[in-house]
């Protein structure tokens, strides 16, 4: 692969858009907005947090100004514990102060927390203004920025408040990963592994055959780009065929049902989202072994890859009753039944909603 931008279409009937990877990166955001048909002259509220705004804020603002936009930068606190309605209110206050109009734009420059909150603020300001996602974590590049799920947490659970609001453009600049803390990079790798298990056995093997997965600097740039492209393409394909999670899109929640339990019960900040998803993938893998829907060999391959990526593989100490209660509160519960995305092979999953409490408890005790 070369330096040309890689363009992945998200083929939605109403609001199709592109995920652009590479090219001029953040320096080219102004031009990319023009290419995406966003009129020059409009007001743009760029939302970011200090870690990201410091290295990349000016670059974006300059590019926006050069292309004829009127940007304002808002810096908010980020971190999972800040993913609240109070933070969204700050974005709304800034939108009011900057006099954003219906034709204005919000840009999320940051990880999944900034992306989810800015997307939600855009969905709800003036009943909906446009949003563009500039993801700067691996997790946001391959998952959170694509697909239009936006929202914040509620004390009762992750992402319980939210809206679907598709971006007009997702622009991924892989070079921003160079400043990302290693732990965050590893957490993003959990979502990459997820794409391998749910539908891309070649990606899974590519990761298995890569000796060092822990840091972007250790990965060949072409390999990193390949991982980004395959993952973003996997996400875009699922979203294109099921925008509102009527069916297929649920497979993207692989590992997340148990993962959300870990995040909720351990407290936001103990485990990163991707780390919790890693634990959740090991848990559902074990449940699938118990149910004999996939082999011990595949479960071991998954666990080894997760461990190689420097991610956790054991269940934390949690009250079993609290686990069951939190599972019941999951967004994906239908008719009182928890829906699990369960692997049937490397590259294949099915949705299962007839898992008993005893099976869940057995599975958790095996991986604790
Ligand atoms: P994050 O947004 O909390 O970012 C992680 C940390 O990295 C932050 O401290 C941030 O300041 C820092 N950071 C970000 N980019 C950086 C860079 N390039 N250089 C230096 N520091 C940088 O974490 P995340 O893993 O990106 O996102 C997790 C969130 O994403 C969760 O809230 C999760 O629910 C959400 N999510 C949403 C979707 C979706 O479809 N909307 C999908 C997956 C996850
Ligand atoms: N991360 C799950 C989804 O976007 O549907």
Image: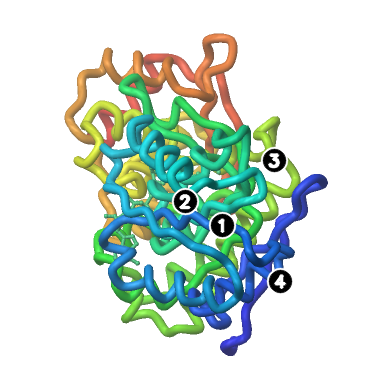
The residue at which mark 1 appears reads as 43
* 156 displayed left or right of 234: left
Residue 241, image x, y percentages: 75, 45
Q: Tell me how far mark 4 sits from mark 1, CA to CA.
A: 17 Å
User: Around disc 4, counting alpha carbons within 10 Å, would you say few (fewer than 14), some (14 to 19), or many (20 or more)?
Assistant: few
The residue at which mark 4 appears reads as 35
The residue at which mark 3 appears reads as 243
The residue at which mark 2 appears reads as 298
Q: Tell me how far mark 2 sits from mark 3, CA to CA.
A: 30 Å
Residue 219, image x, y percentages: 38, 80
Image quarter in which the N terminus is found:
bottom right
Q: Are marks 2 and 1 in contact (CB under 8 Å)?
A: no
Mark 2 or mark 3: whose residue is earlier in sequence: 3
- Where disc 1 sits, the SS reads strand
Image quarter in which the C terminus is found:
top left
Residue at the extreme top:
336
Q: Is residue 146 above or below residue 250?
A: below
- Where disc 4 sits, the SS reads helix
Q: Is residue 117 visible?
A: no
């Amino acid at each position: 692969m070369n330096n040309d931008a890689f363009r992945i279409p998200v083929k939605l009937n109403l609001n199709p858009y592109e995920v652009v990877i590479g090219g001029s990166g953040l320096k080219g955001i102004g031009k990319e907005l023009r290419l995406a048909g966003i009129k020059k002259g409009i007001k743009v509220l760029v939302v970011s947090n200090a870690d990201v705004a410091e290295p990349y804020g000016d670059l974006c603002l300059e590019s926006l100004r050069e292309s004829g936009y009127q940007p304002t930068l808002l810096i908010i606190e980020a971190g999972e514990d800040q993913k609240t309605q109070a933070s969204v209110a700050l974005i709304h206050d800034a939108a009011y102060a900057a006099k954003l109009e219906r034709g204005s734009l919000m840009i999320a420059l940051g990880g999944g927390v900034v992306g989810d909150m800015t997307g939600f603020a855009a969905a709800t300001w003036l009943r909906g203004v446009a949003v563009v996602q500039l993801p700067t974590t691996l997790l946001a590049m391959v998952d959170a920025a694509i697909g239009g799920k936006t929202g914040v947490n509620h004390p009762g659970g992750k992402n319980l408040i939210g809206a679907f609001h598709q971006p007009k453009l997702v622009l991924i600049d892989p070079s921003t990963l160079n400043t990302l803390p290693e732990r965050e990079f590893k957490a993003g790798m959990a979502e990459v592994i997820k794409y391998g298990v749910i539908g891309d056995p070649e990606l899974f093997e590519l990761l298995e055959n890569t000796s060092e997965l822990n840091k972007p600097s250790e990965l060949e740039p072409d390999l990193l780009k390949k991982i980004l492209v395959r993952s973003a393409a996997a996400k875009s394909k699922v979203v294109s065929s099921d925008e509102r999670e009527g069916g297929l899109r649920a497979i993207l929640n692989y590992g997340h049902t148990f993962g959300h339990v870990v995040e909720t019960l351990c407290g936001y900040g103990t485990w990163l989202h991707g780390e919790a998803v890693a634990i959740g993938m090991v848990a559902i893998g074990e449940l699938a072994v118990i149910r004999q829907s996939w082999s011990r060999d595949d479960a071991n391959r998954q666990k080894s890859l997760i461990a190689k990526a420097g991610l956790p593989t054991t269940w934390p100490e949690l009250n079993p009753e609290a686990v069951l209660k939190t599972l019941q509160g999951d967004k994906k519960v239908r008719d009182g039944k928890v829906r699990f995305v369960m692997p049937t092979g490397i590259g294949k999953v099915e949705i299962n909603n007839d898992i008993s409490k005893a099976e869940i408890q057995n599975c958790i005790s095996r991986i604790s």
